[in-house]
Amino acid sequence: MEGHATALVELSSHDAFVSGPPHATFSYLRTHDPVHWTSEPDGGRGFWSVTRYDDVLFASRRTDLFSSQFGIRLEDMDPEETEARRTLMEMDAPEHTRLRRLVSRPFAPKTVGEYETAVRSLAEEILEDLRGEREFNFVTRVARELPMRMLGRLLGLPDDDLEWLVQRGDALIGNSDPDFTDFVVDQVDTSPYRLLPFRSPVSLELFDYASGALELRRRNPSRDILSALLEPTADGESLDERALQNFFTLMVAAGNDTTRYSMTGGLLALIERPTLFAQLPDMSGDELRPLVEEMLRWTTVTMHFRRTVTVDTQLGDRNLAAGDKVVLWFVSANYDETHFDEPNQFRPDRSPNDHVAFGLHSPHLCLGSHLARLEMRVLFEEIAKRWSAVELIGETERLRSNFISGIKTLPVRVTWR
Ligand code: HEM
């Protein structure tokens, strides 16, 4: 590694990611040091950066060796913090399997297929409300709106509450960006909030909101996801109040900005390829699905998730000790040249495209993957019906985060049909 160190960016630094994922660093590491020891200058104890596709896949599947229950983000948490902040994501089997079974019904492919009409009418509404406006920020006017309104529908929440909720979700997921929160994790003292999800007092507001919404449904059950979560399963299992609050917070946090930034990265890829954009109206559903998969690989919005080694083990040519933190860089795996043919090319018909943007075939595979795919496909179908051209008219601005790769501002000019 000596002699090359200056060329590598500091992977533990949020600032290193503001101009985009450091693909050159990842490419170097995949070739020369695929399981790379990464120090954390700001007091963390350091972690292994896993950068190759095969190693990322192995570690996400071997949950017996690489545990989620000590935290899935970089920060070190003591046992009290870990326990208090546990959601579905920070669990291993059998606890994880049990909870996942309880919450997965509304997100199953068949159920999600039934949401298509609702997604389409929301996409139509959002785009028609914009008709006539030629210049706007695509992120706030379109990409933020569709996942937010759809989640509101699924959870049965009033439209008037959605803006407030999504701001809260952004404050949690964007907890390293001062545009989204006053409680920037590496800039202000967040120790008073160490027992709350994302080390943020905003979680308490979401917990309160969740309790209120759940109480309404206990008295007046309806056909939304929250009511479904209150019903015991066939074998009589049900969730307690804290598990319900945590899952609600997880949906608001995980289900909004990820889809928003994938849509935004997807549109930018099309803006940079006007010929492809012009072909959209003639593309069938069967052609749009691979396009959406390539957008997901290309943007890899959740750039990493963390695991903790349970027993001394070997990964690649490195010996990892029990207790070590291991960071699975999905964004690197998705550009691994030994797995993907020409990964730096955007190929709308890439096949196969077994990207890990959703954490491929692992027990923690994204619960919302079918919903996110549906929203992206329908949005681009509806855009194709309405815009004959779209161009970038200013600087894009990115989230300050080494966790989420997101474009906050995408100023566009569109030509309406
Ligand atoms: C393009 C959009 C999305 C991306 C890129 C994405 C990415 C991911 C990834 C990589 C994981 C795996 C975490 C791990 O391995 O530890 C995950 C898990 C999860 N996602 Fe998503 N997600 C997206 C949309 C959504 C949506 C729309 C929802 C819900 C409405 C959602 C809810 C969840 C939940 C609940 C989990 C935890 C699953 C578990 O631990 O068993 N996600 N997501």
Image (tube, grey):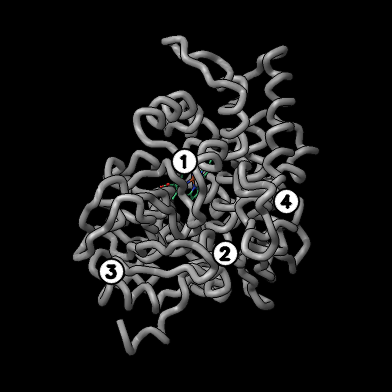
**Label 2: element kind:** loop
Crowd tier of the residue under label 1, counting other residues whose Cα lies within 10 Å: few below 14, some 14–19, many 20 or above: some
Q: Which residue is mark 2?
A: 401
Residue 34 is tagged as 3
Q: Which residue is mark 1?
A: 89
Which quadrant of the rendered structure holds the N terminus?
bottom left
Crowd tier of the residue under label 2, counting other residues whose Cα lies within 10 Å: few below 14, some 14–19, many 20 or above: many
Q: Which residue is mark 4?
A: 128
* Cα gap from disc 1 to disc 3, whole angstroms: 25 Å
**Residue situated in front as seen by the camera: 83 or 208:** 83
Say whether mark 1 is within 8 Å of ligand 1.
yes
Residue 148 vertical placement versus 238 (above, below): below
**Label 1: element kind:** helix
Say which amino acid is labelled 2. Ser
**Residue situated in front as seen by the camera: 23 or 105:** 23
Lower sequence index among marks 4 and 1: 1
**Label 3: element kind:** loop
Say which amino acid is labelled 1. Met
* Cα gap from disc 2 to disc 1, whole angstroms: 19 Å
Which quadrant of the rendered structure holds the C terminus?
bottom right
